[in-house]
Amino acid sequence: MTLPARDTRVTYPDGALTTTTEVVHVAPLGDGRLAVLTETTSFHPVDAAWPDQPADAGVLRAGGVAVSIRDAVVAATDGAELFLGGDIPVRKGTEGWAFLVAHLVDDGDVVAEGDEIQIESDASVRAALSIGHTACHVASLALNRALAGSWSKPAREDALGNPDFDGIAIATSRIEPNGSTDTYRLNKSLRRAGFDPGAVAADVLDTLASTVEATLADWADEGAAVRIERDGDGLTDRRYWVCELPDGTARIACGGTHVDALSELGRVQVRFELGEDAGTPVLSMRTTALPDH
Ligand SMILES: [Zn+2]
């Protein structure tokens, strides 16, 4: 069995939930699971380098039998060996390497190279993660806007031209069903870059949350449209989240899935909390979309 020489083609960026495709390789992982590699997939995998959005949930159907997909991760191969997730030793796009979506199923499930199978993602899980991911992006832009006056020096700008607090200070980002949690490091280099930490002090966080929520409500009321632009249909082809906001068109590099309009988020609630990580103060921003409001 030979390993694929080409990236998996992905259809989830266009909103696809199902695909019919050919199994190009099945690799036993030695831990009771198999990695099923296909020509094309509609199943969103968790990314290896920036694991913000969890994998879809769903099944594949082989010969009429439904097989649970336990997880889906990004894998890579140089033709000789298959590496999964954090074990991938090279950067995305490295010449001579193919980047793949590995659908993980239980060993003993009947899937073989050359089979034509159907892949199906659960629609409600996908919808909730798409809401969470779009909420995460717009909240970061609204946060940057709210903090724009808190810089004493010119800073790198975000997609709307505001100082990019989110991009400069982000430590982790997790997309959840209907929401997200981002954490920001409030370290010395952020202060040296000109950011006033008083803008995120404990006693102003409720006001900051209200400001961000008001911006998000304004943007949603304008019915801002969201789309994904991409350079190609391969897993590693660059993709962008594009949102037509009243403040301008925002374009952010992103490999995840999203809603088609901010109106689908409903009301977005924002909560801030201060903590610390090994002596460094950390700000966390939690968003919760209430799609029925
Ligand atoms: Zn994203």
Image (tube, helix red, strand yellow):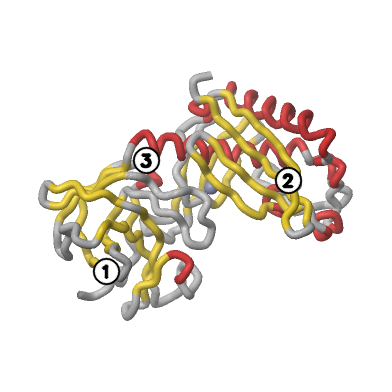
Q: Residue at x 63, y 24 (%)?
A: 217
Residue 283 circle label: 2
In the image, taking residue 121 as reference, residue 255 lies left or right, namely right
Q: Which of the image's four quarters has the N terminus?
A: bottom left
- Which x, y percent locates residue 136? 58, 40
Q: What label sits on residue 15 in the rendered view?
A: 3
Q: Earlier in the sequence, mark 2 or mark 1?
A: 1
Label number found at residue 27: 1
Horizontally, residue 11 falls left or right of residue 140, namely left
Q: Residue furthest top?
A: 293
- Cβ of disc 1 within 8 Å of ligand 1? no
Q: Earlier in the sequence, mark 3 or mark 1?
A: 3
The answer to which quarter of the image holds residue 125 is top left
* Element type where label 2 sits in the image: strand
Q: What residue is shown at x 68% (from left), y 34% (from top)? A: 271
Of residues 118 and 282, which is closer to you in this image?
Answer: 282
Residue 258 horizontal/vertical position (percent)? 46, 39
Residue drawn at (23%, 75%), measured in percent from left and top? 2
Q: Name the amino acid, label 3.
A: Gly
- In percent of width and height, residue 277 lies at 72, 56
Q: Nearer the viewer, mark 2 or mark 3?
A: 2
Q: For the residue marked with disc 1, what is the amino acid?
A: Ala
Q: Secondary structure at mark 1?
A: strand
Task: Tell me the crowding category of disc 2: few under 14, some 14 to 19, or many 20 or more residues within 10 angstroms, Cα based.
Answer: many
Q: CA distance from mark 3 to mark 1?
A: 28 Å
